[in-house]
Image (cartoon, rainbow, N blue to C red):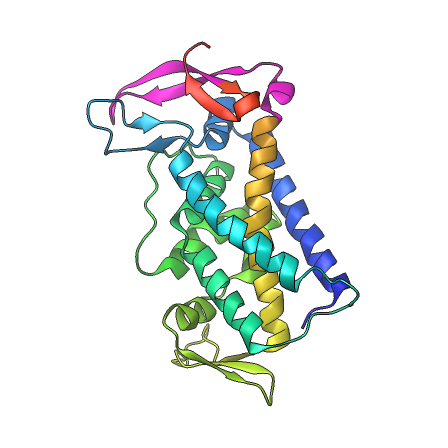
Amino acid sequence: MITKANFTQIDNEVKNSLEEAFAFLKTKCVDHNYILFLADGELKEKYEGFNPYSIDNREDRYKDQTRLNFFIKFMETFYSFKNVNQTDDNEFRLTMELMIYTHIWESKPFLKQLYRLASLANGKSYEWYVEVPEMSKHNYIREDIRNILKTKKLKLSSVISKGFHTSLRNAFAHSEYQFDEHNKQIHLDTYKGGAWDISKISYDDWTKRFVYTALLSYHFLNVKAQKRKSLPVDFGRDKYLIIHPITQTRFRVSTIHYELKYDRFYFGEK
């Protein structure tokens, strides 16, 4: 269960943390790194005969969009707070939330974007190739993303902590959980007794973690889309210089163009 007031507070907290993180990148990053982040630069090794260092990676964007469309319908159904001030707890809604939660923290496109944001915030150059591990994603999320953001005192690190927990992701991903309707708890059968591990979570605490996670996923995509569209105003132009790899060791300065009408980036002049 979560109240409308608490949901609104979390919603604002998540949005503000992302606005702060993107503002930090825009201020602290070299311009071409910030531009590449918004332009979705990606190493596409399957592009034989062409430069594999591409921009406007729509493949990953479409993957996120499919997930986002379902999420929006789910939230409109269960979190619209129409004529009520709090949600109710039922196993159907909880089960759907477990699926959404797992998909978010297993989503390679989403984790790659969080990683790149943290990497740029840490002063590194834009990473064209990011590999999300198949196993031990908990270390990747905690050490390579959350803790890096924490060193920069960005509130986004706290939002990730309030949403992500390895025990939850593991239990839900492997269907090792059960509902305790009498005590309003979810029991996690993956519990091994480690200091970081948890054996159960109350319905109320679960709902907060779900809301933090779901809103983080939703607002991240929205804020990034808004920053793309505001680029021509923010920089006073729609053409930008980037450092574009030719090979792993050779680079050149290239011009990319942003077309607001179609929300797309491409190389060269229009």
Residue 142 visible within the image: no
Q: Which residues are magenta?
A: 230-257
The residue most toward the left is: 49
Q: Is residue 239 above or below residue 115?
A: above
Could you tell me which residue is drawn at 52 percent across and 29 percent down?
29
Q: Would you say residue 111 sits in the magenta stretch?
A: no
Could you tell me which residue is drawn at 42 percent across and 50 percent down?
144
Q: Is residue 194 above or below residue 183?
A: above
3 vs 95, left or right, is right
143 vs 235, left or right, is left
Q: Would you say residue 247 sits in the magenta stretch?
A: yes
Residue 235 visible within the image: yes
Front-most of 189 and 180? 180
Front-most of 82 and 205? 82
**Image location (x, y in percent) of residue 133:** 32, 53
The residue most toward the bottom is: 182
Could you tell me which residue is drawn at 45 percent across and 75 percent down?
197
**Image location (x, y in percent) of residue 103:** 44, 58
